[in-house]
Amino acid sequence: MADFDRRTALKGGLTASAVGLLGTTTVSAANAASGVPEPQIHGTAAWGARPPNGTIEVQNHKPTYIVVHHTVEPGNVTDYTLEHAFWASRSIQNFHMDTRGWIDTGQQFTNSRGGHLTEGRHRSLEVLRGGTRHVLGANVGNNNSTCIGIENEGLYSTEDVTPALWNSLVKMVAYIASQYGIKPEFIKGHRDFNSTECPGTVLYNRLPELRTEVGKLLGSASPKVDVPEWPLLKPGDTGPRVRVAQELLRERGFAVPVDGVFGQSTKDAVAAVAARNGLERDTCGATAVTDETGFLGSDVWPLIARPGTRSGALKARLAG
């Protein structure tokens, strides 16, 4: 999700050996009463974060959704050390601040392939412990006021996460859900909000399992079955869903073929719809590694669908 290039990202900041465990969490009194223990989370001071370039906005409400991401870069590395996790956090912050132009890291928390959890945007840990307010991030375009995000290091389009990453993800999501009173069915993937591959098809397909495991830790009933509202279509896809999209695009005045093939003209039309409607870019934007321009997902479908036709025939066709 937070796309950064390992070869070019700055490696500034203190090393893990230099800072030790500064900023590592302890179990708070509020957490002790919640029944879900706070996992070990290394604060911004621990990994040598740069100070933000602006004021961190803390909103006076709880987030509605917990959103799972993948970082894409630096890929599925086999360095599972705390030192590497701190380096990755610095690299993400450098990319977000120096390339994206944001005031700080976009997401609230980061999870490494070694299972090490770090605070992302400043004040996220402090505010989470309070359990009543929300640090505004930049990880879910047009939905940041309702979402708290966790970046998972790696690319999970075809490969699975490491056991260590999975275990720490379960613990972190359960802790957030406990602090804010969020039900498991409100654990989402980034693609549920934006037209993006994130958090990768493999990890996205494990979200029902994540909801179940988190529900067990919360002592709640089995979560409701989650059915994505809109399918994700990408250039190169084929089939009846692509044909439906092309029919709708033609109704909107785009000269695309209705052949069920997501080719260049369909991609250009989808990109034009996104641009005309000012859809925000976030940490899953295009890089040299992955270009998601022209993806058709949760934020674009409503812009091309006929009003009032989400149910009925259109729903049946998209579900096929």
Image (cartoon, helix red, strand yellow):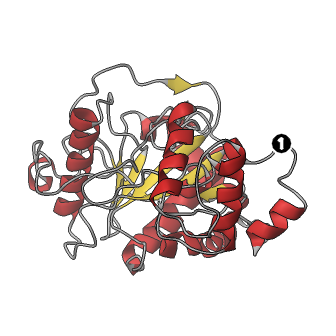
Q: Is residue 157 above or below residue 125?
A: below
Which residue is drawn at the image coordinates 51% and 26% (left, top)?
A: 58
Which x, y percent locates residue 107? 42, 44
In screen coordinates, is 111 left or right of 99? right
Which residue is drawn at the image coordinates 46% and 73% (left, top)?
A: 167
Seen from the viewer's position, the closer of residues 297 and 52 is 297
Helix, strand or loop under label 1: loop
Which residue is drawn at the image coordinates 12% and 42% (left, top)?
A: 13
Which x, y percent locates residue 282? 43, 42
Question: Going by the picture, which residue comes out furthest to the right?
Answer: 312
In screen coordinates, is 225 left or right of 160? right
Which x, y percent locates residue 26? 40, 50
Quadrant holding the N terminus = bottom left
Q: Is residue 24 above or below residue 57?
A: below
The picture quadrant where one finds residue 259 is bottom right
Q: Amino acid at mark 1?
A: Pro
Seen from the viewer's position, the closer of residues 278 and 3 is 278
Question: Going by the picture, which residue comes out furthest to the top?
Answer: 55
Dot 1 alpha-carbon crowd within 10 angstroms: few under 14, some 14 to 19, many 20 or more: few
Which residue is drawn at the image coordinates 53% and 71% (left, top)?
A: 237
The picture quadrant where one finds residue 239 is bottom right
Seen from the viewer's position, the closer of residues 140 and 165 is 140
Q: Is residue 235 above or below residue 61?
A: below
Which x, y percent locates residue 48? 18, 42
Q: Is residue 260 above or below residue 50?
A: below
In screen coordinates, is 292 left or right of 105? right
Q: Which residue is mark 1?
A: 307
Q: Is residue 225 visible?
A: no
Q: Is residue 18 visible?
A: yes
Quadrant holding the C terminus = bottom right
